[in-house]
Amino acid sequence: MPAQGWDVVVVGSGLAGLATAIAARVLGLDCLLVEKAGKLGGGTAISSGLLWIGDNHLNAAAGGTDSFDAVRAYLRYVGADGLDSARMETFAAEAPGALRFFEAAGLPFRLSPRIDHYGMAPGATNGGRLVELPAIDAAELGKWADRVLRPAGPLHRLGGREAIALGGPNRTATWDAAEEVARARPGLCGAGAGLVAWMLRAALRHGVELRTGTAAERLIMAEGRVAGIVTQDGEILSARCGVVLASGGYESNPELVDRFEALPGWQSMFPESLTGDALVMATEIGAALRVVGNNLSLFLGFRNPDEAPGGTALCRLSGTAELTAPRTIVVNRRGRRFADESFFQAVAPRLRDFDARAREQPNLPCFLVFDSGYAGAQSFAGRPPDAEIPSWVSRSASLEGLAAELGIDAEGLADTIRRFNEDAARGVDSEQHRGGTPWGLARFDPSTTLGPIEQPPFYGIRLHPTALSSAGLLADPEARVTHVRGHPIPGLYAVGNAAARTETGSGYQTGFSLASGLTFGLIAARGMARTTNS
């Protein structure tokens, strides 16, 4: 099959890939973006759609204060020992300019009311670093209107700022507003799906060529550099300036998960298309990998089978939904709590605990337990508040019966709930200090996360670990993929979650991943543009 050629070929259509493609076109390069799935957006489409960009101009215009030094201090704290200092410095310095660049390219960014997770950290602020895009009607995409991946349920139709103003997913007002929007403007999409739609709109207007259903199979080398890709159909797509791998991680590839993660019971929170294609193709030509140790981009959740009849639903994150609400706890098989459920970053490291004597991870599996008081007032599994708890959730008229259903030690569970209920009555969690972190206090009074588990029937469901990939391609501050011998591989770039997240290290902060994709996508495009002038 004869080759077709462009200056740039981008693999993957999440924010990182779309950002790279838009930047390439703005800088005068012709660009093809390929996506193996039938719809665009990848992991970005099912995300919150937030980007964390410190010391940005939107915050300054709103009267906020921030500084480059404060941004670096916060990144060092959150990233801990997993940081590559050079990549971190580049991210901190270049992200504000990237925000301006893409704003000029047609993306109307705005501040989000969300705050830094770690209020106790050096350099933390109480707002101004998280940005988002408003909801957008997919009709603006013309023939591409139905080509953006959307999450299940109506809440994705709201912009993040609007959802927060309505009280979030556990408020009936939020659901009523989302369902009204779904009826009145069925094409409206916000959050991650809205971000993808805005990026797609900009890509189309700047002349990016896009193909869905086109899977990259391997990289082409010519004269010592990456010169294109071969698709699974055998088509040769050549790239004069470079190939950019932006196809995400391997979260939906069980073999690679088993190879790089030590988390039994893993479920993927990402679309089935995220199978580590970038990692496989690049390592075939000698690319180096990097594993982010103590990866705290780790969550708990479960699948809602009603969201994918006959298929595999995504793992829903419980850490910002069920686990922050009153009348819920998380316990291990012994029926014991092991972390502050309301702060998911307190839960993450405890999931990796290992009992050297018992030869097991004591906190996996673990279980969400709640009562009918929660069921009658809060949102569960992406349902409106007070919706009926589905039949696939275990339940019993007694705690002993629920423990038997789930395989939990009954005495341990009863003792744990007795202590928790006593604390809930006092409004203070003496065991795990639930709601007591600065992050938690900035969101709500600690006592509002507590509530007794006392009204039968009692409910429970196994929770599963889910995370961003711990391993990725080793990339330098210019987004170039590094060879195992330590030199950049000419013509090959990795952005977004295809690259190891060494710029943000071990820790997790909402918005890090998408902001990195935006920033290093622009850096990669600039690097390829320079090759046309050399």
Image (cartoon, helix red, strand yellow):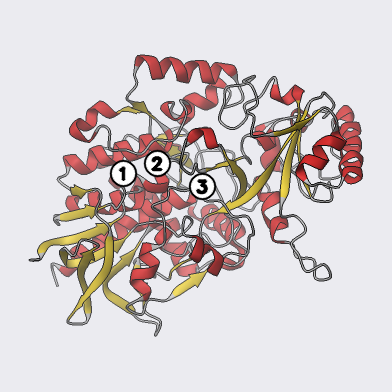
Q: Nearer the viewer, residue 432 or 454?
A: 454
Q: Which amino acid does label 2 sit on?
A: Ala
Looking at the image, tell me whether mark 2 or mark 3 is earlier in sequence order.
2
Residue 41 in which image quadrant: top left
Q: How far apart are marks 1 and 2 (CA)?
A: 8 Å
Q: Mark 2 points at which residue?
A: 45
**Looking at the image, is mark 1 or mark 2 earlier in the sequence?**
1
Residue drawn at x 53%, y 58% as measured from the top left: 72
Label number found at residue 269: 3
Q: Which residue lies furthest to the left in this view?
A: 2
Q: Residue 40 carries which label?
A: 1
Callout 1 crowding tier (Cα within 10 Å): few <14, some 14–19, many ≥20:
many
Answer whether labels 1 and 2 touch (C-beta < 8 Å). yes
Q: Is residue 481 above or below residue 380?
A: below
Q: Residue at x 70, y 20 (%)?
A: 376
Rate crowding at label 3 as few (under 14), some (14 to 19) or many (20 or more) other CA atoms within 10 Å: many
Q: In this view, does 107 lie to the left or right of 82?
A: left
176 shown above or below 522: above
Q: Is residue 23 left or right of residue 171?
A: left
Where disc 1 sits, the SS reads: loop
Three-letter amino acid code of the residue under disc 3: Met
Local SS, label 3: loop
* 464 versus 397 height, above or below: below
Q: Please state the horizontal and vertical placement of residue 308, each as a whole percent of the image.
A: 47, 37
Element at badge 2? Answer: helix
Q: State the residue at coordinates (61%, 25%).
A: 170
Q: Which of 512 and 462 is in front in this view?
A: 462
Q: In which quarter of the image is the C terminus?
A: bottom left
Return the x and y of residue 498 as percentages of the image width and height.
Answer: 40, 61
Residue lying at the far front of the rendered structure: 310
Residue 501, how many percent across, how many down? Answer: 48, 62
Q: What residue type is labelled 1?
A: Leu
